[in-house]
Amino acid sequence: MKVSQAFIPTLREVPADAVITSHRLMFRAGMLRKLSNGLFAYLPLGLRSFRKVEQIIREEMNGIGSLEIKPTVVVPGELWKESGRWDAYGEALMRIKNRVDADFVLSPTAEEAFTSLVRDELSSYRQLPLSLYQINTKYRDEIRPRYGVMRGREFVMKDAYSFHADEASLDEGYQAMGRAYRRIFKRCALTVIPVQADSGAMGGSGSEEIMVESEIGDNTLLLCKSCGYAANVEKAGCKSDYKAQLSIEAGTAVAQGTPALEKIDTPNVKTIEELCAFLKTEAKNFIKTLIYKAQNVELDLSSAPGIQRKPDAQEGQAYPEVFFAVAIRGDLDVNETKLTAFLKASGVELAGEADIQRLTGAPVGFAGPVGLKGIPLIVDPSVTVINDGICGGLAKDLHYKHAAWGRDFEAWNVTDLRTVKAGDLCPHCAEELYEKKGNELGHIFKLGDKYSVAMNVSYLDEKGKSCIPIMGCYGIGVDRTLASIIEEHHDEDGIIWPMSVAPYHIIIIPIKYEAAVKEAADSLALALEKLGVECLLDDREERPGVKFKDADLIGIPLRIVVGDKNLAAAKVELKARKEKESRLLDLDKAAEEVSRIVREELAVLNSSEK
Amino acid sequence: MKVSQAFIPTLREVPADAVITSHRLMFRAGMLRKLSNGLFAYLPLGLRSFRKVEQIIREEMNGIGSLEIKPTVVVPGELWKESGRWDAYGEALMRIKNRVDADFVLSPTAEEAFTSLVRDELSSYRQLPLSLYQINTKYRDEIRPRYGVMRGREFVMKDAYSFHADEASLDEGYQAMGRAYRRIFKRCALTVIPVQADSGAMGGSGSEEIMVESEIGDNTLLLCKSCGYAANVEKAGCKSDYKAQLSIEAGTAVAQGTPALEKIDTPNVKTIEELCAFLKTEAKNFIKTLIYKAQNVELDLSSAPGIQRKPDAQEGQAYPEVFFAVAIRGDLDVNETKLTAFLKASGVELAGEADIQRLTGAPVGFAGPVGLKGIPLIVDPSVTVINDGICGGLAKDLHYKHAAWGRDFEAWNVTDLRTVKAGDLCPHCAEELYEKKGNELGHIFKLGDKYSVAMNVSYLDEKGKSCIPIMGCYGIGVDRTLASIIEEHHDEDGIIWPMSVAPYHIIIIPIKYEAAVKEAADSLALALEKLGVECLLDDREERPGVKFKDADLIGIPLRIVVGDKNLAAAKVELKARKEKESRLLDLDKAAEEVSRIVREELAVLNSSEK
C-alpha cells in the first residue's frame, strides 16, 4: 500500500481536548477523528489495528468453544423491562422510541438479548453448557465522555454470555474465559492486572476485572509486590495492623486492666478531629459509629434486633428499607460497596438527621455502640481489637472513654467493611500494599440466576425436572484495548506497535522515490507482500525527515530505508521502531529477513505459554 | 466443529410470518431468530455465512483501492441538518435525543459522516480521487418490515463514497465500482441484473442498480432477451410501436388526408373508457392530456409560456411551483418519475379541480392540446405520430376529433414520459420487452456535488484555485445479499450453499457415532481441518434420517457418510448437496479429494473472468 493512497492524515499539533497519550497519538497518527463529543470515526490506519484486536479476540473466543452470534444493536425495550434493567439502569441507557411509539434500547450490554434467544431454544440439559458471544456496537449515553475512545459514547465490545446447569460447570466456563482473556491480552502485548472485583449491582459471586495501569484510571487498585495480591479498592481486604488479631467472638477480648467505662462531657464536640484535639489523642483510639439506611436488603435479618419492616414478598423477600449502625476504628473509612455487598442490598446511604435522632436518641455526632438498642450493629474487625476506646454516648454532648469490645458492647455481626489504603497490609502475606489507578479492559463475572429467573429461562434435567440455568457474562472493550496498547507502547516520537496489532508490519522509505531507488523500493514491497508481510511504501514527495517523523509517529514496527548510497552496494537499511540502532541488509535477502523477523515476533506474542 | 456444540437449532415447522423462501429457510436452518418485528439475530451458522459475504465485499473493495473506515452508527443530527436530509428524509430516519436533548441520527446511510470527515482533511487536488467505505450497522425505521432480513429495520450495509476532481475521474471510479460489484456477486454465485435506474430524489446523473429477480421485489424491471437491455420501469424507454417513428419536430407530421378538426358533443362523457364506448373506438386513438403541479422545478423555463412565478433565489433558482400540461397517447400511462426527472423537480402531482378549471377553462375531463394557452405543454413522442386523434375540447362536454400533431397543435417540449410495459419494444433492438420483479442488492450512483456544496467541501487545484469535489456513492446490503443467495440456491429440502459462502464446506455424518465409525469420522474431520477444509461433524445421537434431513436443510455443499458397511471396505460415501448421486471414496484418500473439490469450486467462483 502506497502512503499517498492510504489516507493517513498525520498531524504535528496535538488536539486541544486530547489529554491522554493514546488519544493524542491516535489523532496525530491519523488513526481517528472526532464526529462529536464521545463519537469517533476510525480512519484506515486505525481500523486496521482495530480489526486485528477484534480478530485476536475472535480467535481466542472460538478457541474455547464460544460461538459468535449477532443480535441487533437496537433491542426491544420489552426485554429490558422483563429483566428489570429498563428502570434500574439509569440515564446512561439510551432509550429510543420508534415512529409508532414503541420502546427500544441502544444496547450498552446484551444480557437480555442473549437470555431471550437462549430461552426460546433451550429445552434439555444436553444443550448445556452453552457459551455465546458477539463483537458488536454498544452505546452508553455517557454524561461526560473523555479520553478519546477510552471512554466514548459509542464503542465496540466483545460480550459473551454462558449458560450452565450447575456451579461446577459455570466455574469451568469462568476459568476457561479467564485463560482466554489472559491469552488475548498477551497477544496484544498488554501488561494486565487481574483483580478480584466487587460484583456491584449485578448480584452474583465470582468476578474478576482485568485492569491496565493508567494515570486516568477509574479504579483504585491495591497491589502487593510480594505475593501478587491485587484487588479493587471496592473489595480489597487487609490484615489488621494491630500486633495481634484477637478473636472476633464477642466477649473473648476481655479488657484486662482497662478502667471501667467513663462518661465524658464533650460540649459541641462532634467530629473525630474535634474530639482528638479536645482529648489530645489520636483517631485510631476512637470507635466511630455511623447510621446507614439500606435499600432492598436480601440478607437474612431474622436474628437482627429492631427490624422496622417485614421482607417484601413482591421484591423476592427483600427488606425494602432497613437502618443499620456500623462501627469502625476512628482513623478508617467504611467502604460502602463492601457494606452493600454484605447486606445484599441495592444501595446504602448515611441516614439523615431525623433518623439519627430517632435511632440513637441524640443528634448527629454522638452515636456509639455502648447501650445502642433497637438497631442491628455491624462492626468492622478493627473494632474488635479495641479494648480501651472512645465512643459516642447516645446523648447530646456526651462521649464514653475506656470502652472495650466484648465487655461494654457486642455486635449483631462482625464483617470487614474497611476501605483499604496504600500502606495497609496484604491480607495474604502481610506485606505493605501500594495503590495504582487502573482502567478496566475486561471483566469476567459469575452472574448466577439473576437473568434466568427474571426472564423465565428453564430446561429439563436428566430426570425430566424443570431447572433454571445459571449464567456467566464476560466483556472486553475493543476500543479501550486498542488505546491501552498505545498507552503501554509509545515514546516521545509516537506509537511503537507490537507486531500482532500493527496496522502494517513494515514501512519502506525511499529517500527519493525515483529511478533506481524507486525500482528497488517497489520490488522489495512486492517481494514482501508475496511473503505475506503487510507493507507500507512512502511514495510521497516529501523530505526524508518528514517521512521518518511520520513513520515513527504511526509506529510501524519495522522500517527499511532505500537510498542511493547503500543501494550502490546493493544494501538497504533496516531499523526496528523499538530500537535505536539500524543495520544494513543485502537487498536481495531483505524480504526474507524481514519476513523471518515478523513471523518470529508474531510467534512470541501468539505463543500460548504465559 | 461438532454439531452438538454448534448451536444449530433446526426446525421442522415453518414460522407463520415467513412468507418467502429465504426467510423460511434461514429460520428452519437455525441461522436466524427474530428479536422483534424487523430485528433479527444471526445464530452461529447464519453468522458464518454472513461474515463470508462481508469478507468477499471487503476484498473486492480493497481490490479497487477503496479504504475501509468506521464512523459511528449514531451520528450527530447537526450533520444531517447541514445536508438538508434532517428535514427531507422522512419518518424512516430514526431520530434520537440524548440526555441533554441533543439530536442524533441512527445512520440509514452515511453521506453526511463521510463528507464531514473528508471535508476536514481535504486540502489539495493531490489527495483526489479518494474512495472510502464502511461495512457497518444501519437503521431504517421501516413502517412495515417484512420478508425477514430482506427488509429489516436494522441491517448491515457496505456503503462507499468517492471524491473526485472532475467528471472523468468520477466516471473512472464509478466504472471500477461497477466491476467490483459484478465480481462480488459472481463470487456469491448470484445471477444479477444491472439496470439503469432513475436517480430519484438524490439528484445527479449516472446510476445503476444491481438487481436480483424476486417474486416479492420492490422494483419492476423491463428486460430484453435479445440484446440484454434492462431498466427499472421508472426509467425504461421503448421504441414507438407505430410502424414509422415520424420526426418529432412540430409541423413536419402533416396530416395529409386527415379531415379538418371537428367538434363533438360529449355530454357527461369524461374518461377515456367512456369516450371509447361513446365513440366506438380504441384508447390508442386518443390524445390524453393531464395537468400536473410540479414543485421546485430546476429546468430552464425561460422559453415556457405562462409561467406563474419567478425562480426562487433562496432555493438555488428553482421555481417553487409550476403547472404543466402533459399529453400522451390514450392507452399509455405517464411515468411520473420520468416527468419529475425531466423537470428536475422535487416532485409532481396531478393538479386539483380548481387549478384544472382555471388553466383549461373546463372541468376535469376536457383538457386537450388544441388551443391550450398559458401553460407549457409537454408531449410524449407517442403523440407526435397521431395524425387523426380525439382529444378534450377545453370546454364542458366538448371533444375534438381529427386532431393532428403539427397541424392543430404544437408543444413546448417533446420528451419520453411513457410508462413502459411488457410487450413494448426494446429501445435498442425493437424486440418485445418482458417484465420481472426485482430486488435491489446494490446501487452505484454518481452523486455530483449535492453534498460537497451543501456541506462546504473544497480543495485547491494545481493553480491554487478553490474547487468543489464531486462525489459518487455505492451501497450493497449484506443481509439482503445473503438472503438472495438462498433465494437462488435451494430446493424443496433446504439450502444449497455455493462453496464461497457456505457456513462449512463439508458435513461428516457417522451412521452411529461410536467404535470404528467414530474413530474414522474423527480422524477424517481432523485431516480435513488440517487441509483448511471447514468441517461439521454430526456427533448427535439421532437417527441417520434426521441427520440427513438436517444436513440437506442447512445446505452444506459436501456430505460424507461414514458407516460400518462401507468402512469394512475402507470406504466412505461422498455426495454433493447439489447432486443426486453419491460416490465412494477410499477413506485414506477422502480428505485430499474433498480438499481438491473445495479448492476447485472456490477457484471457479473467485475467478475474475466474468
Image (spheres, coloured by chain):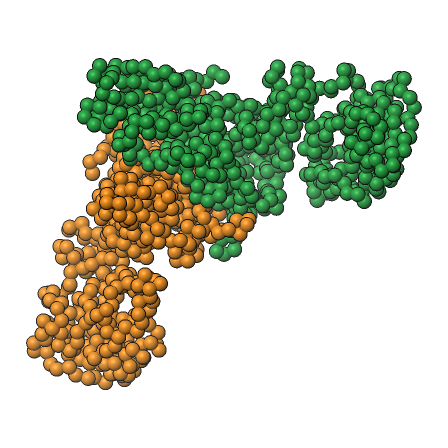
Chain colours: A orange, B green
Q: Which residue: 26% across, 83% down?
A: A395
- Count of numbered circles on the image: 0
Residue A99 in view here: yes
- In this rendering, is residue A92 above or below A176? below
Residue B517, by quadrant, is top left
Q: Residue at x 90, y 33 (%)?
A: B265
| B357 relative position to B191: left or right | right
Residue A178 visible (yes or no)? no
Residue at 14% across / 76% down in the picture?
Answer: A404
The spot of residue A37 in percent (x, y) is: 47, 49
Along the viewing direction, whichever of B13 and B369 lies nearer the viewer: B13
Q: Position of residue A563 (x, y in %)?
A: 37, 23
B315 shown above or below B103? above
Residue B237: which quarter of the image? top right
The answer to whether residue A255 is left or right of residue B418 is left
Above or below: residue A51 compared with residue A283: above
Camera-side residue: A274 or A391?
Answer: A391
Say left or right for A14 vs A270: right
| Residue nearest the observer in this picture, A417 or B211 | B211
Query: Image quadrant for the N terminus of chain B?
Result: top left
Find residue B271 and report its horizontal and vertical position in percent.
Answer: 79, 34
Residue B47, horizontal then vertical, whole percent:
39, 34
Left or right: A418 in relation to B39: left
Write the residue at 29% across / 35% down.
Answer: B5
